[in-house]
Amino acid sequence: MRVDINAVQRVYRRYAPAYDFYFGAMFQPGREEIIARMDCRPGDRILEVGVGTGLSLSIYPRNVELTGIDLSREMLARARVRRRRERLNQVVALRLMDAESMQFTDDSFDKVVAMYVMSVTPHPARLVDEMRRVCKPDGELLIVNHFQHANPVVRGMERLVAPLSRLMGFHPDFSLENFIQETHLDVVERIPVNMLGYWTLLQCRNNKIPTTGISSMQAIA
């Protein structure tokens, strides 16, 4: 079952006030690992998709240019407070935006990262296509997310609660194999992260075809 945008906005409006308490420390090892593996260089332009309340913002090096987007006004408002309070000057913009239809031009970023977003978005393949589009051809895509567990008992429990996906704001029976097949991601490395390795980090090359100066729409035509 797929969640929809309205369901996501409702759920994260409810989550926002207590999100840091419930999901801060639990997910922080994955955030730290993914940023450590980005090998950021001075001046790199980085996009974080689904920045939420900004729990990852302070981990990024101070010499990059970081943009964050999110679909939830309530979560984004907390990220903006965090940026001001912690004086995170590397964060150049925090924008309300649907990640499945980004308002950025092609090849805008050196690296694009999505943390705990893929099982939330209604159309994961569409989101990956947008990440690929706005990232430079020689850039990098990084994803950390929960995927359906290999253990049959745990996988069965995930399937049982899947019908509640619209209430939870994500679908727990999200298949890693199907995701990679549908998105055609060029995965360099898969790394288990967080408690018991229940989440997976995907480090990927941006394997899009360069458009050599023409727009993506022209390239499709």
Image (cartoon, grey):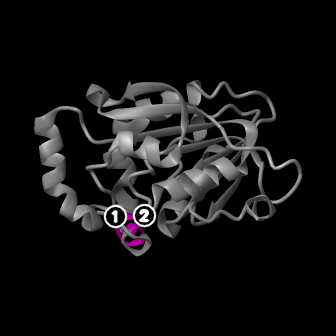
What residue is shown with label 2?
A: 122
**Image quarter in which the N terminus is found:** bottom left
* 172 is higher (above) or lower (below) than 217: above
- Residue at 46 percent across and 49 percent down: it is 182
The residue nearer to you, when weighing 90 against 189, is 189
Q: Where is residue 152 shown, x and y percent of the image? A: 14, 36
Residue at the extreme front of the image, as rendered: 221
What residue is shown with label 1?
A: 2
Q: Secondary structure at mark 2?
A: loop
Name which residue type carries label 1.
Arg
Q: Where is residue 45 shown, x and y percent of the image? A: 75, 42
- Indicate left or right for 121 with 40 as reference: left
Q: Residues within 10 Å of mark 1 (few under 14, many from 20)?
A: some
- Bounds of the magenta span? 8-13
Q: Is residue 87 visible?
A: yes
Of pointers 1 and 2, the one earlier in the residue sequence: 1
Report the predominant secondary structure element of the magenta stretch.
helix
Which quadrant would residue 141 be assigned to in this image?
Answer: top right
**Image quarter in which the C terminus is found:** bottom right
The residue nearer to you, when weighing 183 against 118, is 183
Which quadrant would residue 215 be assigned to in this image?
Answer: bottom right
